[in-house]
Structure formats: structure tokens, C-alpha cells
Image (cartoon, rainbow, N blue to C red):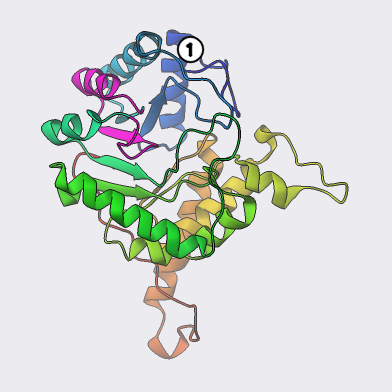
Amino acid sequence: MTPDSFSDGGRWFDTTTAVKHGLDLVAQGADLVDVGGESTRPGAARVDEAEELRRVVPVVRGLAAEGVTVSVDTMRARVAEQALAVGAVLVNDVSGGLADPDMIPVVAATGAPFVVMHWRGFLEGGNVKGVYADVVSEVADELHARVEAVLAGGVAPDRVVVDPGLGFSKDAEHDLALLARLDSLLDLGHPVLVAASRKRFLGRVLAGPEGAPPPARERDAATAAVSALAAHAGAWAVRVHEVRATADAVRVARAVEQARAAAPAAAAPTGDGVRAAQPAASPEGAR
């Protein structure tokens, strides 16, 4: 519900169109529809609270009335509270509760699952503090500290989902390293959400010899590949723009896992780096 999203800004800005699009996403295989009214792309200006509420609440209400499982993508406690009141079941806060001190008490009081993303500040003016000596260990440590703060604020441990924050204060090599070591995030003991869809690092990977990355909407096949890899690594969910390709990719990844599990033990792959993908437990109330 933004006019300035990096991927599809303005396409779903009207409430009726947005609700229809959400229903289309479910028909394509989405388990949960994430509704946001504020772009978090680098350099995006913040909208005021009243405008964010105007954008988000009617769409959440409309989708929930149709039986859709809805999450609200917001850094504001009041937006989260009102969205939950009209039918959202999960709060997806890219700041992990840092942008609004009232967010954690609101989430704790409602008992909603809470996505805690790795965040180093607003991206106004470009990439903020995107310097790491060891991105995997630093992101894991910072997420652990943030989760501890969320738990101390009253959110139940089985309500917490973690997100490595791909593209947020991170370059392409940082994003790829985090995807390669999702096991380090799973070791935190919470379900992991991967939000790689159409992001800059995929454009870098796909860039031709001239170095020009394809437009965001031409990165869906690459997104589906990341989705399959994330599913194999044990991610709880992937957040994507184009659902059907990713739903198919995840279905194939699961089928391969099931075939591996059914194979005789002597035929199972061996060697360092090979591990069985174990889906993380889903927080109650979200799928």
C-alpha cells in the first residue's frame, strides 16, 4: 500500500485493488498476506501515522473479512494495534521494536506473533552502518540481543520469529553470506523468516557482463531459487512478491527432502555441509 515501493510501488495503492491482489496471492499459494503502508527501501521518506493508518487498516479489514491470514508490516505501535484489532494475526516490524518504544508492549498485550528483523537504523540517506567484520556472527549476535529485549518486554518465546534483514544495511556479499549460513540463525531457537524477494543483491547476482542489474520485477526466478534454498535450510517462511513460482519451488524442495528421508540410510548423502532441512515450529496463530 505504498506509491514508492522499490518493487511495485503504486500498483496496489487503492484499497479495493489491494484487497483483490491479496486474494489473488492466496489463490496462487500464499499462506499469509503481509500488508504495509510505508516503504522501507533505502532513501524512502517516512509517512505520517495518520496516512499509514489510512492505507493499511481498510486493507487488513477487507482481507481478514475474506478469511485471509494477515500480517501487518509496520514500525508503529498504533498501526499494529489497530491492524490487529481488525483481523491481523502477526506483526512484522523491520525495526524489531526499536523504532517505536510502544511496539513491544502492544505486541505483548495482544499475544500476536512478532517478527524481529535485524536492523541498524533507518535507511534515509543510503546504506546505514553496513560494515561488518563477520556478518553472520554479528547479525546472529545482534538478533539474539534484540530477541532478549523483546522477551524481557513480555512477548512469549513461542511468539518470536527472526529475520536476518537482507538488504538492510547490507551489501550483496553480506546477504549471500547470511543465506549460506541460515543455520546460524536457526540456532537462535526461533522460526526464521527470509525476505529476499527482488532485492538488490539478486540484481547484482543476475547482472550481465556490462554490470547492469535487471529491474526488480525481472528477479522472480532468482527469488524462487532463493526460496527453495531457504526451505531446504529450514526457514519457517519466505516473504515474496510473486507467489506461484516460489510456491512451486518450495513444493519441489519439500518433495526432494521427503524422498531423501525415505531413502535407505546407506544411500543418504554424506559429507560436511549436508544437513536435513527441519521446518521450524510455526508460532500459534500464524502459518
Q: Residue at x 19, y 33 (%)?
A: 107
In magenta stretch: residue 95: yes
Q: How far across and how far down the image is residue 25, in percent? A: 45, 29
Relative placement, left or right, of 20 versus 9 is left
Q: Quadrant of the C terminus?
A: top left
Magenta stretch: give its range. 75-99
Q: Is residue 133 above or below residue 170?
A: below
Identify which residue, 4 or 103, lies in the foreground: 103
Q: Residue at x 69, y 37 (%)?
A: 218
Q: Which residue is mark 1?
A: 17
Q: Quadrant of residue 32?
A: top left
In magenta stretch: residue 177: no
| Mark 1 secondary-structure assignment | helix
Q: How far across and how far down the image is residue 131, in percent? A: 56, 53
Q: How far across and how far down the image is residue 190, in percent? A: 28, 56
Q: How far across and how far down the image is residue 136, in percent? A: 47, 62
Q: Quadrant of residue 242?
A: top right
Of all residues shown, which one is farthest toward the right? 210
For label 1, the crowd category at 10 Å Cα-Cα, with few meaning under 14, some 14 to 19 and many 20 or more, is some
Tell me the amino acid under the disc marked 1.
Thr
